[in-house]
Amino acid sequence: MEAPRFTQIATFMRTPLAQSLADVDIGLVGVPYDGALTNRPGARHGPREVRNHSSLMRKFNHVTRTNPYDLCRIADIGDVEFHQIFDIEGAHRDIENFYTLLAKAGVMPLSVGGDHSITLPIMRGITDEPLALIHVDAHTDTWDSFQGSKFHHGAPFLRAVEEKLIDPKKTIQIGIRGAQNTLESWSNSLEMGMRVVFIEEVFENGIGAIIDEARQLVGDTPVYLSFDIDALDPIYAPGTGTPEIAGMTTIQALSLIRGLRGLNYVGGDVVEVSPPFDLGGMTSMTAATVMYEILCNLSECVDSSKLA
Amino acid sequence: MEAPRFTQIATFMRTPLAQSLADVDIGLVGVPYDGALTNRPGARHGPREVRNHSSLMRKFNHVTRTNPYDLCRIADIGDVEFHQIFDIEGAHRDIENFYTLLAKAGVMPLSVGGDHSITLPIMRGITDEPLALIHVDAHTDTWDSFQGSKFHHGAPFLRAVEEKLIDPKKTIQIGIRGAQNTLESWSNSLEMGMRVVFIEEVFENGIGAIIDEARQLVGDTPVYLSFDIDALDPIYAPGTGTPEIAGMTTIQALSLIRGLRGLNYVGGDVVEVSPPFDLGGMTSMTAATVMYEILCNLSECVDSSKLA
Amino acid sequence: MEAPRFTQIATFMRTPLAQSLADVDIGLVGVPYDGALTNRPGARHGPREVRNHSSLMRKFNHVTRTNPYDLCRIADIGDVEFHQIFDIEGAHRDIENFYTLLAKAGVMPLSVGGDHSITLPIMRGITDEPLALIHVDAHTDTWDSFQGSKFHHGAPFLRAVEEKLIDPKKTIQIGIRGAQNTLESWSNSLEMGMRVVFIEEVFENGIGAIIDEARQLVGDTPVYLSFDIDALDPIYAPGTGTPEIAGMTTIQALSLIRGLRGLNYVGGDVVEVSPPFDLGGMTSMTAATVMYEILCNLSECVDSSKLA
Amino acid sequence: MEAPRFTQIATFMRTPLAQSLADVDIGLVGVPYDGALTNRPGARHGPREVRNHSSLMRKFNHVTRTNPYDLCRIADIGDVEFHQIFDIEGAHRDIENFYTLLAKAGVMPLSVGGDHSITLPIMRGITDEPLALIHVDAHTDTWDSFQGSKFHHGAPFLRAVEEKLIDPKKTIQIGIRGAQNTLESWSNSLEMGMRVVFIEEVFENGIGAIIDEARQLVGDTPVYLSFDIDALDPIYAPGTGTPEIAGMTTIQALSLIRGLRGLNYVGGDVVEVSPPFDLGGMTSMTAATVMYEILCNLSECVDSSKLA
Amino acid sequence: MEAPRFTQIATFMRTPLAQSLADVDIGLVGVPYDGALTNRPGARHGPREVRNHSSLMRKFNHVTRTNPYDLCRIADIGDVEFHQIFDIEGAHRDIENFYTLLAKAGVMPLSVGGDHSITLPIMRGITDEPLALIHVDAHTDTWDSFQGSKFHHGAPFLRAVEEKLIDPKKTIQIGIRGAQNTLESWSNSLEMGMRVVFIEEVFENGIGAIIDEARQLVGDTPVYLSFDIDALDPIYAPGTGTPEIAGMTTIQALSLIRGLRGLNYVGGDVVEVSPPFDLGGMTSMTAATVMYEILCNLSECVDSSKLA
Amino acid sequence: MEAPRFTQIATFMRTPLAQSLADVDIGLVGVPYDGALTNRPGARHGPREVRNHSSLMRKFNHVTRTNPYDLCRIADIGDVEFHQIFDIEGAHRDIENFYTLLAKAGVMPLSVGGDHSITLPIMRGITDEPLALIHVDAHTDTWDSFQGSKFHHGAPFLRAVEEKLIDPKKTIQIGIRGAQNTLESWSNSLEMGMRVVFIEEVFENGIGAIIDEARQLVGDTPVYLSFDIDALDPIYAPGTGTPEIAGMTTIQALSLIRGLRGLNYVGGDVVEVSPPFDLGGMTSMTAATVMYEILCNLSECVDSSKLA
């Protein structure tokens, strides 16, 4: 990482491309799939461009002074390979199979989407019991079917509860906003027992209060952190499929992630980065930085004895 | 509005194109005129692009739970037709004539400009007595003549007071900022008795205080809400003719509008959206959302008995 | 069409929105579907933006002096309504159903895609016997299955031959170029008997020779004209999913279409316009002009006695 | 001009800012006026951006080996000062007054617009008798009134004939194309006796034939060269108000200008550059190069004895 | 400055181009040098584009009501002339020589970069003893050598301390953030005794506290204000070489500068504006406004008796 | 290469990243250096973005039917590592050292710049005797010193002759154009005996004549092909440092390269791609295609017996 940042092949964070999963504690994965989108496309190009802009990232966190590269072995392990991109359920099987391999190899995944539907097969691959979920997003993604599919990008967390991949009582959704055509998505989340934090609450009560509540809700349960880039205000993330104005600031987002250090992480993702709608790489650079901050948190959960 | 949002003809908010004014309570109108601008042009393209991006809008307000489409009949009634675009006063007559027809048909207008000069002929068309005015803007728009015209886009509210279309004592101007070559515009507003809220006051005292003051100032007087998109920081609205940095946030703007529910609205507008200077449709999408929030407020003022 | 071109609702060519198919001879249709793409997405936004830029179009062709609006009744008939966008075959049924209705109503369709897979269900809807085909494109689109589907956007003309919707002996493919991973697509076309005109031949022999050959090939057979915007050099059409440099010029394309006047047209389309990859609306404006030129040709095939 | 080209104040061609007209043979002038446009605005920003990109220009023409700076004294003489920008006729008076001063001072003008309406008052300022005119454009600009004005940007050459500023028999219009709503503009030119060269003729007969004809037509008559940037294909000049696809190439345009050396020039202009619609400065850079080539031609008409 | 803002030559703030330093109190200078950058280039184009966008600036500060043009003689004095742009130390000599002349002429400089390395030779030119320094930036710029040079853009303030151009005890660095590969830059600043204000402290304690501390630290010592545009969040300043998300807002930046009125200023600069990475001129417009606010502060330090 | 093209790590042409030079016949190399530029920067980002867009490339050439991957082993061998980017001569040593290693390993290089100065140290690394040179460019790059350096990007071929790396009598420069401040660069080339083909000759005589002459000139001499992307018209390659309008078309460029098959190639490069000035990746995509065509030519020169 000492070379000028515009040089060499673009891997995530300028980490080495893994030759074998055996040498990897945290695997950085691309999931270039956007076939489950309902509005503006392009998230298939997300992993490529987040890799590109992640060259700006470095080692030591200026707030926590964490250096994840000191704590564990981190590598880019490439993209999920797809064989059925025209069929949501087929593509989801491709994803699940990939993450099942990671789980077997003991690699903790930090993924870049792709649309938000990918979180469902990722979870299928990495867990056998309900996870706690920290879900940062403008939308609850607990709608039911749309245009004939139960697995579109607005539905993963309704499905994840049904499939017992997450515990709705240990799920917190942060940053929710934007008018809707029905009350369905909000009421589904609330009725299942999820904690829904609308954006107004973020601005009124502050990030500190949300951190406290999330930590209490999650406790020691294995937890997954899913960050939809549209949680952020579109000024930070114009390159996304379903933007909603008046969202979270990056200062809030980074404070939130840093405030959630020390939980029992099993993985995380950053999704819905759509480069064709981006402006000057702003969204990809922001996603790369969010990814770095999540990486700091995940790295503290790896058994560091392996490093020696 | 249930169809994928990228489909079909772009009308405002995906409302039907009105076949007759008789079936409309609130008319969404485009006023594609920018002949009165003093700096960067392009607001003539505003209605077209706000329509385009307003397809992202939906029904239920996530804060107030208002659904304006339940409360009244809302339709896109097209653009003002122009016959004299090279002459400010002629173009203003075209506008006035159009709004006079709306007033006669009992249609409350929610308009998209166009430059800010259009608010003057809109008011001429819809009122016979001084209105209260909530004016959100970076500029007071109370300059006198420039380059030989009294009717340029920096002058409408000086003219509106002279023509007794607004009551300066019931006028509040919010978000004012930016260096000026003379003190004229600020002192004109103050001398006429308007309440001028500079942006620093917005950040120091908060939106709540401004809402309280505005509600008290306006009371039950019929009130018009004019929102110049340059009130917002240019990061939210780069596509405008006279940007001034360090402006209002969208969170503040939406809170302000929501806080002004229940007043006696007679109309509103969103002006100065200049697509040629926009970045990725950010300004148009923001303007569409501001328009939706104003629509929620206006819809609560319509005699809902008509719906039955 | 006399009003300033930046005003009013954006319909195709500023034609009226049809209230009933009974009053329409040529229907301008949007097909906002891009679920069958193999590379860069975004063609779902094509109809919206081609409508937007088609406001620049006017009536009299400066070369042929044709005015299509004098010859027949032309209207925007909206977009195909989709109910199964996540399933190629389902979406194709939605398209086929729509065009079946048009065929019954005697409306000749001129469509804007969408990805090139849409031409297959359009043809299913409008013909019972093999059509002649003039196919302008960088790719032959006669591949077989990819990623598990036979109906992706690179396969429609292989399928169309199998389904006897087109006669390969009366099919000419113009503008073909770009390296390929296998020889399959080129050899499929040639083996079925299609005439494949690579771009080098266009530049060496000139458009006149191709026009002559195409006219002879097609003769009086009912003919469909399918124009993939990537036939053009990417400098004219950067907004497309699979650009190939060194393509056709617009002068060549317009000359080609004008040279093919007087054939027995049953419909046409312009496809693969992807606005998220466009630059300043160049591709949409170009597509709108190509559409206008095709419209001129189609309009001369309508029974003008209806107009009286 | 030896300094790095990104340095110092942006004057036209990096020439000195004139302190006095007495020291200037050819004056480079900006005319930032676009109030007479009928479609997309922005040409008011043309002079600023053409100045900016003209820093790329240098001295020796690689074809003719002319160095205009060796032949005469060339300076940037600033922009026309406007006092009535909201009134076409008033703005035209501002322009005429400026050029009358130039004419008195013996300065030959090379101007950058601004919309095409400016050529009319420029001619009023610089000539008392009918000039020959070489007019390169996509449009004939010989329409009559529109939206109540006789002086909009589509009318200057009809007015110029009426005012005897140009001799229609010694006028050639090159590059004409694009559909029109009426046949008026083409027939007006032809009926007045102008030579109208449609773009197809340019491609079919070649630039050489046009050069020959233009030279013969113009002869020794004092001649003005007016270059509307939309004569060029929009790929070279996307930043313009009324683009028409399938236009002239830059190779053709430069050959044309070089082929017209040695005529009796009295001035020239480059108009309709609209930076808000430009892409990466392409239009401004192209306009600056066209301006340089015209400058080479004009410089050969100056009495070089003054230099000594 | 009364003319329409899109007209005339682009000088800084539309001030006159100085004919002689004798008539200037504050000189606005461009330093178009970016040869010392370690990441994304383009700051060489900064002065040109800040000049361009500074035409939007005007006279009276809406908060302080300062009009700098009433207080002293302000002029654009052009760019530093470079003769050795391929050699950092040579280029720095060109800069130093230029500022030495300014110092001799009694002209206070307000400069626009260029990369941050330029502040070192500017200081060499204007002071003989250690200055106090207010340094607003995302980075401390106190690294040591990189790629074989001690004078790259991340090192100027380590060098300035070594060369006794600044007093580290009277230096405050505000807005610092972003992960680093080593702890070097932060520890260098702290070990030399600089006050390092990380961005989190800005958000937690507020600008008022920082103003108080900076005023106390600086006291009456002659002080230089160096503003790296990357101190701001990339949403305000995407056009810069080393962006770091989650930065200062413009409201904070303007409040900070206004809060630092009345200090004993000897000069200031705005650096690291890289137009090739900018979006719609946002960064240049923001830089121009920051420059205006600094100008207000500097203007109050000039001996106004000269004006009479 | 069968996977969807938007997936996986971006290597040149989606070739494998070489683990050892021993397995490579043709090495695709990035040279991200732009420190020798005299005008607009950004070519340091060239290799990264050409890799990104080269994912669109495939195997079989549609004209020659060459499949380079059948003929030899081709791999991405990463970027030159730099240790002295602030010093042209130091950076050139870094480059030379890298290519010396390639030469020793018997790897033929196909490089992507970077500015054109890199061709000099590449040649130093790969040859001991004068090469023939096919040089496609808008500029002859045979200037002498500028701003104190002999090794800037406008000088490499004057130096290469001096250092006996190329034989000027076997050098052809194609596409030359653009005004210059002195006649130096043209006359230097001509005086050394190079064949200089100005762009007008390309358009007048056609590519075929140039191919014939170049083949004759080069004969069997080992030959290097250096392609400066600014040889192309800026419509194809806006992202470059010194654009000149009215350049070569891509059809011409591809024909030229294909016409030069079968020469005795020892390497090639594509230089001066500057992504910060690019529009929608057009330049990078074009450069990737030019690179592919050169690769086809080079692959035919490799001893294919190695493959077995």
Image (cartoon, coloured by chain):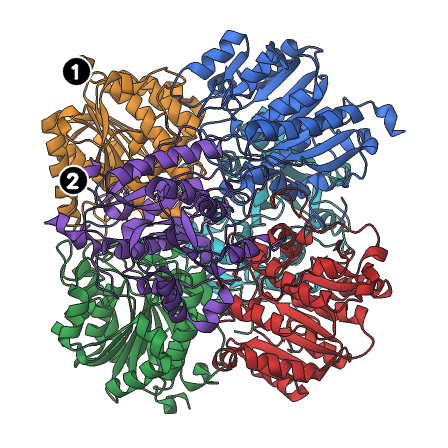
Chain colours: A green, B purple, C orange, D blue, E red, F cyan
Along the line of sight, which residue is nearer the eye, B80 or F216? B80
Give me the C-alpha separation between circle 2 and circle 1. 27 Å
Q: Residue at x 23, y 68 (%)?
A: A140
Along the line of sight, which residue is nearer the eye, F65 or D34? D34
Along the line of sight, which residue is nearer the eye, B21 or F58? B21
Q: Residue at x 64, y 22 (%)?
A: D225
Q: Residues within 10 Å of mark 2 (few under 14, many from 20)?
A: many
Answer with left or right where residue D289 lies relative to residue A286.
right
Name the subunit of mark 1: C
* Whole-percent x, y for residue C223 in the image: 21, 23
The quarter holding residue C76 reads: top left
Identify residue type, mark 1: Lys
For residue C95, which numbered disc appears in the image?
2
Residue at disc 2, secondary structure: helix
The quarter holding residue B172 reads: bottom left
Residue at disc 1, secondary structure: helix
Identify residue type, mark 2: Ile
Seen in the picture, residue E47 relative to B26 is either above or below; the reply is below
Say whether mark 1 and mark 2 are on the same chain: yes
Q: Which residue is mark 1?
A: C306
The quarter holding residue A249 reads: bottom left
Residue D130 visible to the viewer:
yes
* Residue situated furthest right in the rendering: D308
| Comparing labels 2 and 1, the label whose residue is closer to the camera | 1
Answer with left or right where residue D139 lies relative to residue F63.
right
